[in-house]
Image (tube, helix red, strand yellow):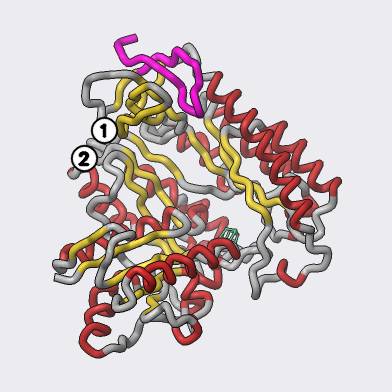
Amino acid sequence: MKSVALHNLGCKVNAYEIDVMQQLLQEKGYKIVPFDEKADIYIVNTCTVTNIADRKSRQMLHKAKKMNPEAIVVATGCYVQADSEIVEKDEAIDLAIGNNKKGEVVRIIEEYLSEHRASDTMIDINHTDRYEELELKKTADHTRAYIKVQDGCNQFCSYCIIPYARGRVRSRRPEQVIEEVEGLVRSGYKEIVLTGIHLSSYGIDFIHKDSEDYLEQGMNEKDIAQKRGYLLQLIGGLNELEGLERIRLGSLEPRIITEDFACALSKLDKICPHFHLSLQSGSDSVLKRMNRKYNTQEYANTVEILRRYFNDPAITTDVIVGFPGETREEFEETRKFVSEIGFFEMHIFKYSKRKGTTAAVMKDQVSDQDKNERSEQLLAIESQMSETYRLSMIGKTVMTLFEEKKQIGDRMLWIGHTPEYVKIGVESDEDLANRILPCMVSGPVLGGICIAKTGNF
Ligand code: SF4
């Protein structure tokens, strides 16, 4: 029996795909071992979103080869997709499997094992409209399952390499998503998180098949998708599933949150009031250079709509500092804007030049020192905003889905999350794993965890 060690880098879509690859290999009788053990085959599911992600991907591939020079080292995913000559260039890599080919991992590895080469391991991702159907039965996390419903992106933000690594928008048929989630619910999962490379585009590729009438009226694809409400229909279908308790949405584009969308969402009882709306910059001129399709006023309106339909929802976001040409004044606009919005969490990224993108050749690249300073400033604001949101939980009764028991400082605590994704910790001798219980948040907040008590309140 051959042993396989897998390691994942990057986003939740990648995490979903590596879980499926592991499952496929296990079903074929391969033995799964931890990545730091000696294995016959190593698989690194790579990421290329930043230079650091590229570097980490390379490091893990080299680490694998070093651990066992006899092993077959397989690089899968975005880093190899974006640079398909990588196998020739890097002697640590024996085999590269591109995106849309991960479902064939067993066939490809077995071909390589018998012939020392494998065919058809990569496609031209920019010219495919096929969604690669994968099905997940379980994940390492036993309470929350991340479900991939969409791949690819048509947005071409000027800094982003992802459309070149993931191709154009391809969506998964709702029946398939529902079938997968039904299986996961039967296995005990209570919460699902819908993910995609550009979740807000879910369904725009169904349009040509479903909406000739709208196309004839000259409507664009985005508007048709919104009119057809593909994403809402999918969420509505999932909301009906018995045994499923929570639906969390992955990153959304602000423009999808219209009054109608928010109103319809708020009527679905399983939706978590936790919305990740990518901001990237709080300066309109920077947003324009980034080729983002909204301005700060529209963004603020979106947040206002959500706050009207949901009771104090958790709004989280991503921000890039040091985008080419970002002046002190533009950064100041961002600093002011994020403070005004009041996020629960903010992920801050320093702009990373990606070869082949429009922003890579823009003039006035920002120095590393300025990027570091700006990032530090936003991190300080982030930690303050997060603490304020957590403190606002004190005195409230919150439904918490418990995951695991952990040592936090000198206390053993059961850790779980509220629908807003606030971390809760309670002391209990009972086994709380995978249970949803009402908790009274008593405080204090310790290292980002709100201390609470379970009981009937
Ligand atoms: S929306 Fe923009 S940032 Fe997000 S994946 Fe697409 S191109 Fe990249």
Q: Amino acid at mark 2?
A: Gly
Q: Left or right: 10 with respect to 183?
A: right
Vertical comparison of 394 with 16: above or below: above
Residue drawn at point x = 31 percent, y = 86 percent: 118
Q: Which residue is mark 1?
A: 434
* Whole-percent x, y for residue 441 in the image: 44, 16
Give the extent of the magenta segment.
Answer: 439-457
Residue drawn at point x = 58 percent, y = 50 percent: 253
Q: Give the distance between the C-alpha atoms of the residues marked 2 and 1, in whole angstroms.
A: 8 Å
Main SS of residues in magenta: strand
* Whole-percent x, y for residue 288 in the image: 75, 57
**Which numbered disc, 2 or 1, marks the residue closer to the eye?**
1
Q: Amino acid at mark 1?
A: Asn
Residue drawn at point x = 38 percent, y = 71 percent: 66
Mark 2 touching mark 1, by CB under 8 A?
yes
State the SS at label 2.
loop
User: Total marks drawn?
Assistant: 2
Vertical comparison of 24 with 442: above or below: below
> Residue 438 falls in which quadrant of the image?
top left
State the SS at label 1.
loop
Q: In the rendering, which numbered label is found on residue 188?
A: 2
* Whole-percent x, y for residue 381 in the image: 68, 34
* Whole-percent x, y for residue 38 in the image: 27, 66
Ligand 1 lies in quarter: bottom right
**Mark 2 surroundings: few (<14), some (14-19) or many (≥20) residues within 10 A:** some
Vertical comparison of 76 with 295: above or below: below
